[in-house]
Image (cartoon, grey):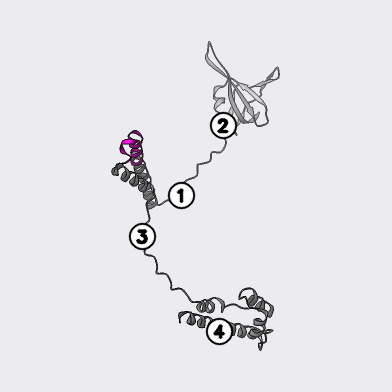
Amino acid sequence: MQITVKSTRVLKTGTNKSGDWELIGLTSDDGTTYTTFFKSASSLAPGTVIDIGEPEIKEGKVSFKDFTVVSAPPVFAPADKSEGMTPEKWAEKDRAEQWSRECNTCFMGIMNLASSHYEEVQELPLFKAACLWGLAHFQPAKPETQQKPSPEPAKSKSEGITTDLSSLVFTDAGKLKTYLKADLKMTGIEIAAATAGYNLLTEDGRRDCWADILKTREQESQMTETNLEG
């Protein structure tokens, strides 16, 4: 008879003429509890399948004298946390850990000095400098300074309009007018004036209308900047 081990525990222990003995309780995965004096049963791992032969049933209790292991539960290897680590990464990890230990030792030494002789040392410049040193060295090491690229010069409003909006394509007249109203904040009169004379039912007409609107807004932006500079 084969059963699958769910759990085991030592129920009783004692000594007789043969020596020390243990009564082991074993519960199978179907909930049945068995007893045996076979000591090695206590070390069976959950999920182990064993053959106990024909069990003995006496006064409602089920027991067996011996067993053989049919199959053991699978053992999963722990995940390899070092996956992807290179010698350079290991060296950096070791350096960071050593840095942390050294800084912790130094800082705790400073704090121990403060706690035992605080009244005496709190006003000493050396103590204050030591505290600042300890706090500074608790910060993670800064990466090597890399030269930052020079920021691009700010674009004028007209440049922004020409660069960002000229590539827009409107598939119908309604979308063009909606964009003029919602995004460019043009009034109905301004929209009517800006689109007059263009056949907005064609792609060429919408493209030419949009290009002229951008050109007009660019000229207005340049005039505004000129007036501000003057």
Q: Which dot marks residue 83?
A: 1
* Residue 36 covered by magenta stretch: no
User: Pointer 1: residues within 10 angstroms few (<14), some, or many (20+)?
Assistant: few
**Residues tagged 1 and 2 counted as in contact (Cβ below 8 A):** no
Choose between 180 and 14: the one closer to the eye: 180
N-terminal label among 2 and 3: 2
Mark 3 sits on what residue? 145
Q: Residue at 32% across / 44% down in the picture?
A: 128
**Residues tagged 2 and 3 counted as in contact (Cβ below 8 A):** no
Q: Amino acid at mark 1?
A: Glu
Where residue 36 sits: x, y (%)?
A: 60, 21
181 lies above or below 36:
below
C-alpha separation, residue under disc 2 versus residue under disc 4: 81 Å
Residues shaded magenta: 106-123
Q: Amino acid at mark 2?
A: Ala
C-alpha separation, residue under disc 2 versus residue under disc 3: 56 Å
**Residues tagged 3 and 4 counted as in contact (Cβ below 8 A):** no
Mark 4 sits on what residue? 215
Quadrant the N terminus occupies: top right
